[in-house]
Amino acid sequence: MAEQGSRAGARPARRRTWMRAVLIVATVLALAGAGAVVYVVQLAGRFNANVHRSDALSEAFSEAASPSPSASSVSVPKLSKDTNILIMGLDSRLDENGRALPQDIQNALHAGDDSGGFYNANVLMLVHIPADGSRSTEISIPRDDYVQTVGFPGAGFKAKVKEAYSYGFAAKQAALLGSGRANDDATYQAARDAGRAAELATVSKFLGGVRIDHFVEITMVAFYQVALAIQPITVCVNRTTRDTFSGADFRAGTQQINAQQAMAFVRQRRDTSDPTYDFTDLDRTRRQQAFIVSVLHQLKQAGTLTNLPKMEAVLDAVSKNMAVDRGLDLLQLAQQATSLTNGNISFSTLPILGFGTAPDGASVNLVDVAQIQSTVRALLAPPVPPAPKTTRTTPAPTAAETSPGAAPASPSSAASPTATPSPTPTTTTYADWQGQLQGGAVPCVK
């Protein structure tokens, strides 16, 4: 729900408004760019009333999110526990207040007008940030996974995981209007919160009761505004591909793209120029992961977000198209979670059994829930490898060593306890959506 100015007893507005600036970065990677805060905080007052703050987290779970420490603290403590953040990207062609987007934005998105899409969470990414500063983990949840819904009246049936938001929204809106509530912004925002809560609860249950500490919700227009701020963006694709639905038209290899092309890059899920090219929605998920990695790499190499004139023009529009939970302290998190800002993060997509058809005729991803939850446990808490043994033993001498006048062993045959194997170069080319995609360089993907 949008903040309506200062309230009695609230912290000074200026101390909180840095969050609005960092949220622009959260659109593409949820958290990067702590250095940009120094610049953007000067503009903070202008965005104070724009960013939506939501109570959905406390609605979704029995315990509300813990209040975060004041952003004005001189000393920022390290994370006291691992943190999980759910990124929800909506396919709605409306803004956070339910209004249609301007025509020029609709044209740039190449996604149809406001009659298309709905409040479905087409992008679902769980970002896990370890408290010890080690490598972060992102888990992409395919939007069409066929799961059991929870978190709203009448839930319990199976649907695409992305649809929990729209079901929660519709149920709450119908209940409020049926009770005589006016069809106004308050009713609309309450329904949005119910949708968020339903999505959070459904995802948590599907992943095996995973705790979700925070969430960031973005719309397509917010993503577009971020791309405008940082263009050109370097991406790489394995082969030439075109798609008339998303507007994708990319040549093989590394290339720089603008904001409109970036929208096509992360939305492409078919190739209309070659019917034999097996391009699926799961490949689109890998594109989204690759885009985040590319942006992280670009920010680190070029410091794009420290260019204030380039950022200033889009901050207003971006802040109007995001929602976060009330307890999210992005500045503190960005200062602590250096694995994100340094690109030390791996990306995985949850496995599916195959494609199927729901009773209503919808195409869905068939999943093994036990396999999903086992995979998530392994990704969030990988087994610790045993510590290498440090005790050294002296091997018994060989016959050659004990023979009188024996020649010393050649260097090639002698043991070398200090030698270490050459590091294996990190692969940056990915043939499909399976396996982990690593941060640190621009990846080449399908």
Image (cartoon, rainbow, N blue to C red):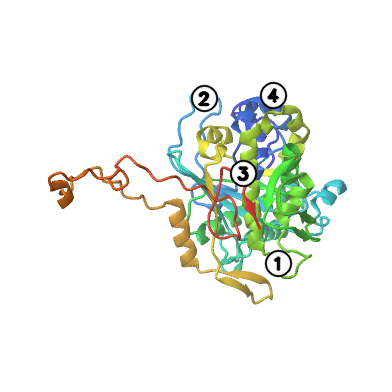
Say which residue appears at 72% left-offset and 70% top-offset: 276
Can residue 440 be seen at all in this image of the molecule?
Answer: yes
Given residues 256 and 95, the one toward you in this image is 256
Q: Nearer the viewer, mark 3 or mark 2?
A: 3
Q: Are marks 1 and 4 in contact (CB under 8 Å)?
A: no
* Label 3, label 4: how far apart the Cα atoms are: 23 Å
Q: Residue 117 location, x and y as percent?
A: 75, 59
Q: Secondary structure at mark 3?
A: helix
Q: Which residue is mark 4?
A: 42
- 425 sits to left or right of 100: left
* Label 1, label 4: how far apart the Cα atoms are: 49 Å
Q: From the viewer's perspective, is residue 213 above or below residue 370?
A: above
Query: Tag 2: residue type?
Result: Ser
Q: Earlier in the sequence, mark 1 or mark 4?
A: 4
Q: Which residue is mark 3?
A: 29
Q: Which residue is mark 1?
A: 277
Q: Residue 432 location, x and y as percent?
A: 60, 60
Q: Are marks 1 and 3 in contact (CB under 8 Å)?
A: no
Q: Earlier in the sequence, mark 1 or mark 3?
A: 3
Disc 3 crowd rating (10 Å Cα; few below 14, some 14-19, many 20+) is many
Query: Tag 4: residue type?
Result: Gln
Given residues 255 and 279, the one toward you in this image is 255
Q: Which residue is mark 2?
A: 73
Q: Nearer the viewer, mark 3 or mark 4?
A: 3
Say which residue appears at 67% left-offset and 51% top-offset: 89
